[in-house]
Image (cartoon, rainbow, N blue to C red):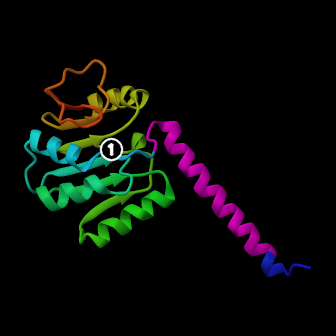
Amino acid sequence: MATMLEVIFSIFIILLVLWIAISSIRGFVIGAPILYSPKRATEEALKAVDAKPGERFVDLGMGNGRSLIIAAKKFGLDVSGYEMSPIIFWLAKLNLFLHGIGKSRLFMKNFYKEDLSRNDIIFCFLTPPAMKRLRDKFEKELKKGTRVISYGFRIDGWQEKEILNPGLPGKIFIYQKD
């Protein structure tokens, strides 16, 4: 017969697994499935937007933090990112730590509910429905001159400043808020 401690521990493990599963599924639902943009795509995009050291860079759906590492190490950007999946979030925190990125802001939050107005460069690898939803948020919140990089998908209703086709799967769409 199981002891009370074993029962409590089992319930804790089940609740933990459910929390992780639900959080991960939420990412898919809001349009941020776990997909990784190629390193070269991030590098090419940051060159194209003329990223300057000290500018604020945010990745909406940061995954393992790859784009944040590139932005911080190669371009000297002040980085932040959002991720809904707890496992992927902690993987990103570890990845940034292992790459020596001490100054970063990582959030396990829904980026739709966060103020993005302080950022200079926004990076997205999100689904078309997510980009459509973000368009209205960008129009309301972003300051003039903010650059938006979308890997793989256009922002309907916005005119691209540039479209990069660096020989990777998918194009890179560059926008700048008027």
The residue positioned 31% from the left and 20% from the top of the image is: 156
Is residue 61 visible to the viewer in this orientation of the structure? yes
The residue positioned 73% from the left and 74% from the top of the image is: 9
The residue positioned 66% from the left and 56% from the top of the image is: 18
The part of the chain drawn in magenta is: 7-33
Q: Amino acid at mark 1?
A: Asp
Q: In this rendering, is residue 11 above or below 107? A: below
In this rendered view, identify the residue nearer to me: 145 or 68.
68
In this rendered view, identify the residue nearer to me: 1 or 138.
1
Give the structural element (helix, strand or loop) at label 1: loop
Residue that mark 1 sits on: 115
Q: Is residue 21 magenta?
A: yes
Q: Is residue 83 left or right of residue 102?
A: right
x then y, percent, for residue 7: 81, 74
Q: On the rendered image, what quadrant is the N terminus found in?
A: bottom right
x then y, percent, for residue 88: 45, 57
x then y, percent, for residue 5: 79, 81
| Dominant secondary-structure state across the stretch colored magenta | helix
Residue 26, image quadrant: top right
